[in-house]
Amino acid sequence: MKNTFYAIVFILTAFIGHSCASTGSEGTEIQSTAGGGIKTLLASEFNTQEKDTNTVVIDVRSPEEVANGFIPGTDLFINFFDGNFQDQLQKLDKTKTYIVYCHSGNRSGKAANAMEQLGFTSIYNLQGGISGWTGPLSQK
């Protein structure tokens, strides 16, 4: 199942990356710009996808929130409110694809904007954050 998830995320990334703007399966506009930018990923799409080795999932919630569970397959936990948040982002590989989430999508949207300002070109914000997630949660 993990390999299928990676394959679907890769295909979705390729498909969305080649369009300027399109509409998601639930009528949600996927915001993108030519050559990259921030895109919205529906929780229903994330639930059925696997990421490829070039995709990194980042949870930007606080450690206290993470302690209550996180989305399986999350690679990094970078607290948006941490004083060195920007420094942690700058250490990341800008050529990779990033899926960012928080509790509701607000902080992750701000994090995605910060990443775009730092030169990241392939960023997905999980719409509704972990609140929109319908799958099981992992624990640390």
Image (cartoon, grey):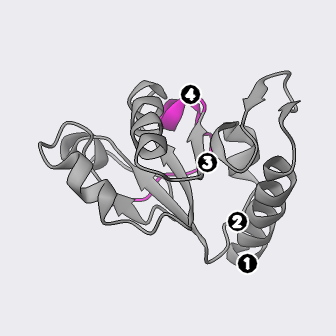
Q: Give the residue at mark 2.
A: 50
Main SS class of the magenta portion in the image: loop
Q: Is residue 21 left or right of residue 123?
A: right
Q: Position of residue 10 (x, y in %)?
A: 76, 66
Q: Which residue is mark 3?
A: 135
Three-letter code, disc 1:
Asn
Check if mark 4's residue and mark 2's residue have beta carbons within 8 Å: no
- Identity of the amino acid at label 2? Glu
Q: How many angstroms separate mark 2 from mark 3 (CA)?
A: 13 Å
Q: Please state the total of marks drawn on the protein image.
A: 4
Callout 4 crowding tier (Cα within 10 Å): few <14, some 14–19, many ≥20: some
Query: How far across and how far down the image is residue 129, in percent?
Result: 51, 34
Comes first in the chain, label 3 or label 4: 4
SS at mark 4? Answer: loop
Q: Earlier in the sequence, mark 1 or mark 2?
A: 1
Query: Dot 1, how many residues are within 10 Å of its Cα: few (below 14), some (14-19), or many (20+)?
Result: few
The residue drawn where x is 56% and y is 67% is 96
Q: Earlier in the sequence, mark 1 or mark 3?
A: 1
Q: Amino acid at mark 3?
A: Gly
Above or below for 97 versus 103: below
Structural distance between the alpha carbons of marks 3 and 4: 14 Å
- Residue range in magenta is 127-140
Pointers 1 and 2 in contact (C-beta within 8 Å)? yes
Q: Secondary structure at mark 3?
A: loop
Task: Return the residue at label 4.
Answer: 128
Q: Of the two numbered discs 1 and 4 on the same chain, state the one appearing first in sequence.
A: 1
Mark 2 or 3, nearer chain start = 2
Q: Amino acid at mark 4?
A: Gly
Identify the residue position indicated by label 1 in the image: 3
Q: Quadrant of residue 90?
A: bottom left
Look at the picture and state if 5 lies above or below 134.
Answer: below
